[in-house]
């Protein structure tokens, strides 16, 4: 199946991906880079990166035997991110852009179902095709995979950045057990140049622009999404802009993500407030303290039931309150 035929199948699907690419290079290009990063302990508490699953990231065939190629998709939340930022109350809580990027829903469900639809149509059109979806969960270096599919370069903040879509994108892929009649495109070259805006803006100095990696234990995103226990506040977290769930600071300053790069039209995102009503109610209606009190009033079960389909569910009530406290104690 060639590019035109694949494009026809994609056009018949409901997926809103902004770009896609193909690669038959199953081997990660930056595994050594990743390994070196682990050896230096830069992954901090993210043990799932360094345990028995580490070596599986070297080649796609480790997660999908007989993998021959992959189709890689970029899903953008750039517009929603820019709209969402306008609702942030001054000195109030701030959220990472992907939270409101997919109608307030957990992107794993949303993107996962688009990928499933595409995979089903591919299988219906290509005899004997086997597929496997990857989206965060499997031990795959997904930025590397997107790089191999020609969708961007590794920024100094380690984000996969594309010229047309910046880095407010999520990567979802379909691994295939056959090759398609599509030429590999050349890998994208670096377009960061001398810019180090991301590393300079990071309030916790988590970014090493030389190796284009981050130190996970210093990263606000890691602290606010992946660290659930009531640990001591992240050093310099108070210098943030009130990030209580995830962090986009290193992306906000990136020239490739500036508003003018995108054709922002709030009307294009229909019913933004309605779709994100929970986020509006709990995060965008008052001060940090107001928001904190709203969450404190919820029982653990109440929190789970209310936020179960949203990205916020990840931290649980306890983890989220820890993030608020970390910022509130710092501002006193
Ligand atoms: C663990 C993880 C995290 C950790 C660690 C992040 C990190 N930078 O390592 C934490 C919790 C901090 C995190 C945060 C975020 N994450 Co995250 N995360 C992951 C996960 C599960 C694994 C990443 C990983 O393996 N890290 C290890 C490092 C060493 O690898 P890497 O980040 O891929 O970096 C590569 C480049 O640095 C490259 N490289 C650098 N220089 C050079 C030079 C050359 C020549 C070459 C070849 C390669 C190269 O080599 C590295 C290894 O491949 C992936 C999903 C996946 N399965 O891949 C999502 C993923 C990377 N995260 C994603 C997102 C959206 C985020 C956040 C923006 C969320 C938020 N708003 O809070 C932040 C961004 C923070 C940041 N600046 O990275 C997206 C990134 C999409 C994109 N456009 O890049 C991914 C791909 C999820 C997805 N399916 O879309 N994340």
Image: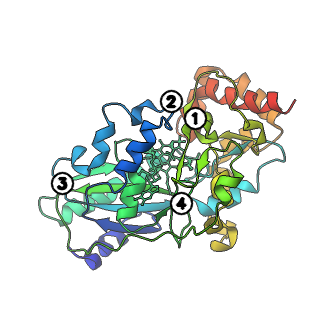
- Label 1, ligand 1: CB separation under 8 Å: no
Residue found at the far right of this picture: 332
Distance from mark 4 CB to nearest ligand 1 atom below 8 Å: yes
User: What residue is pinned by disc 1?
Assistant: 217
- How far apart, in angstroms, are the residues tagged by discs 2 and 4? 23 Å
Mark linked to residue 45: 2
> Residue 19 at what x, y percent from top left?
44, 69
Q: SS for tag 3? A: loop
Which mark identifies residue 155?
Answer: 4
Q: Which mark sits nearer the N-terminus, 1 or 3?
A: 3
Q: CA distance from mark 1 to mark 3?
A: 38 Å
Q: Earlier in the sequence, mark 1 or mark 2?
A: 2
In three-dimensional space, the C-alpha distance between marks 1 and 2, rounded to whole angstroms, equals: 7 Å
- Judging from the image, what secondary structure is the residue with disc 4 in? loop
Residue in the picture at 57% in, 37% down: 222
Q: Are marks 2 and 4 in contact (CB under 8 Å)?
A: no
Residue indicated by mark 3: 130
Does 245 appear above or below 118? above
CB atoms of marks 4 and 3 within 8 Å: no
> In the rendered structure, which disc, 4 or 1, sits on the residue that comes first in sequence?
4
Q: How is the image coloured?
A: rainbow
Asked whether mark 2 lies closer than 8 Å to ligand 1, one says no
Q: CA distance from mark 3 to mark 2?
A: 35 Å
């Amino acid at each position: 199946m060639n590019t035109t035929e694949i494009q026809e199948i994609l056009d018949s699907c409901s997926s809103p991906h902004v770009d896609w690419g193909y690669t038959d290079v199953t081997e990660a290009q930056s595994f050594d880079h990743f390994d070196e990063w682990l050896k230096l302990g830069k992954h901090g508490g993210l043990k799932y990166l360094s345990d028995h699953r580490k070596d599986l990231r070297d080649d796609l065939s480790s997660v999908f035997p007989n993998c021959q190629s992959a189709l890689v998709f970029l899903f953008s939340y750039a517009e929603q991110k820019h709209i969402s930022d306008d609702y942030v109350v001054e000195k109030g809580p701030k959220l990472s852009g992907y939270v409101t990027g997919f109608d307030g829903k957990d992107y794993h469900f949303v993107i996962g179902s688009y990928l499933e639809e595409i995979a089903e149509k591919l299988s219906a059109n290509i005899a004997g095709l086997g597929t496997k979806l990857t989206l965060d969960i499997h031990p795959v270096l997904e930025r590397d995979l997107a790089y191999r599919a020609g969708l961007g370069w590794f920024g100094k903040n380690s984000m996969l950045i594309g010229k047309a879509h910046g880095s407010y994108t999520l990567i979802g892929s379909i691994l295939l057990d056959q090759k398609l009649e599509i030429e590999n495109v050349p890998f994208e070259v670096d377009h960061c140049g001398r810019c180090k805006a991301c590393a300079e803006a990071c309030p916790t100095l988590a970014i090493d622009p030389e190796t284009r990696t981050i130190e996970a234990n210093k990263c606000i995103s890691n602290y606010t999404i992946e660290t659930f226990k009531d640990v001591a506040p992240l050093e310099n977290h108070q210098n943030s802009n009130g990030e209580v769930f995830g962090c986009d600071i290193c992306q906000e300053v990136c020239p490739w993500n500036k508003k003018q790069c995108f054709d922002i039209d709030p009307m294009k995102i229909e019913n933004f407030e309605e779709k994100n009503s929970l986020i509006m109610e709990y995060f965008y209606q008052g001060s940090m303290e107001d928001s904190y009190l709203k969450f404190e009033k919820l029982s653990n079960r109440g929190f789970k039931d209310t936020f179960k389909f949203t990205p916020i569910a990840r931290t649980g009530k306890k983890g989220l309150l820890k993030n608020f406290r970390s910022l509130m104690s710092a501002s006193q």
